Amino acid sequence: MRLRPVEKLSLETRLRLVNSLPQLVPASQGMPLPSGRHWHLRLAVVRGVVGMLPSCTFNRTRVLALKACGVRIGPATMFLGLPHLQGPGSIVSRLHIGGYCGFNDGCIFDLNAPVTIGNHVSVGHEARFLTTITQEGVQNAAPITVGDGVWLGARCTIMGGVTVGAGSVIGAGVTVSADIPPNMLITGAKPVSLARWR
C-alpha cells in the first residue's frame, strides 16, 4: 500500500487516523475502566432478599450477605442499610472494608477501581465513593483510600484518586476531589487542623 503525503489527505481522513491511534493515559489520571458484565447475580439476590429488611435492623445479616458475595469486611463492621455496589466485572474484589466501621443507609460505591476503607470509620447517610473520573471526554478509574478513624458526613462525595488521611472529618455534603492530610476538618472552603485538639 502506498501512502499519500499528509497534505493531500482530507480533513475527515486525518481525523479518522488520529482517532484510531490508541489513547495513552498518564498515571496521574488513573487507569482505564475495567470491562465485564454490569449485572451480578449474587448481589441481585442479596438486594432482593436482604434489601427488603427495614433500615437499622438485621445489621449482621447484611454483613453476612455481603461477605457471602465476596466483599472483604473486617470484624464488628455494621451496615444500617444495604449499600449500592456498581461497576463492571468482579466488583466485590475491589471493595476492602476494615473492622469496627459503621455505614448508614444509602451508601453508593462506584467500583471501577479499588476502594479501601480503614478501621474505625464512620460513614453518614447516602455517602458516595465515585472512582470514575471524566477528563476531556475520556473516562478513567482511580482508587480511593480512606484512613483509620475517619468520619464522613451525610451525602459527602469522595472522588477517584483521593486519599483521606487518618483521623480526618469530612462534613455533610462536601465533595472531596483532592488528598486530605491526616487530622483535618473539612466543612467547606478552608480546612481546619484537628492536631492541636488531639
Image (cartoon, rainbow, N blue to C red):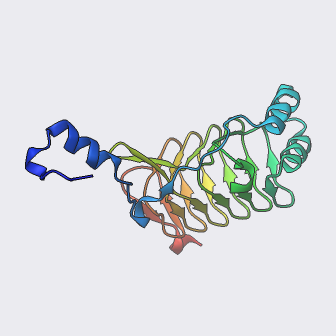
Name the foreground residue: 173 vs 177: 177
Number of labels in the image equals 0
Q: Residue at x 82, y 29 (%)?
A: 51
Name the foreground residue: 88 vs 198: 88
Name the foreground residue: 10 vs 124: 10
**Residue 144 sits above or below residue 127 on the image:** below
Quadrant housing the C terminus: bottom right
Q: Residue at x 63, y 42 (%)?
A: 87
Return the x and y of residue 132 as percentages of the image width and height: 50, 47
**Residue 178 sits above or below residue 40 on the image:** below
Return the x and y of residue 191 as percentages of the image width and height: 42, 60
Q: Residue at x 14, y 43 (%)?
A: 9
The residue at the far front in this view is 1
Q: 116 left or right of 53?
A: left
Q: 11 left or right of 130?
A: left
Return the x and y of residue 123 as percentages of the image width and height: 66, 49
The residue at the far left in this view is 7
Q: Residue at x 60, y 66 (%)?
A: 167
Residue 128 placement: quadrant: top right
**Residue 30 sits above or below residue 39 on the image:** below
Residue 147 placement: quadrant: bottom right
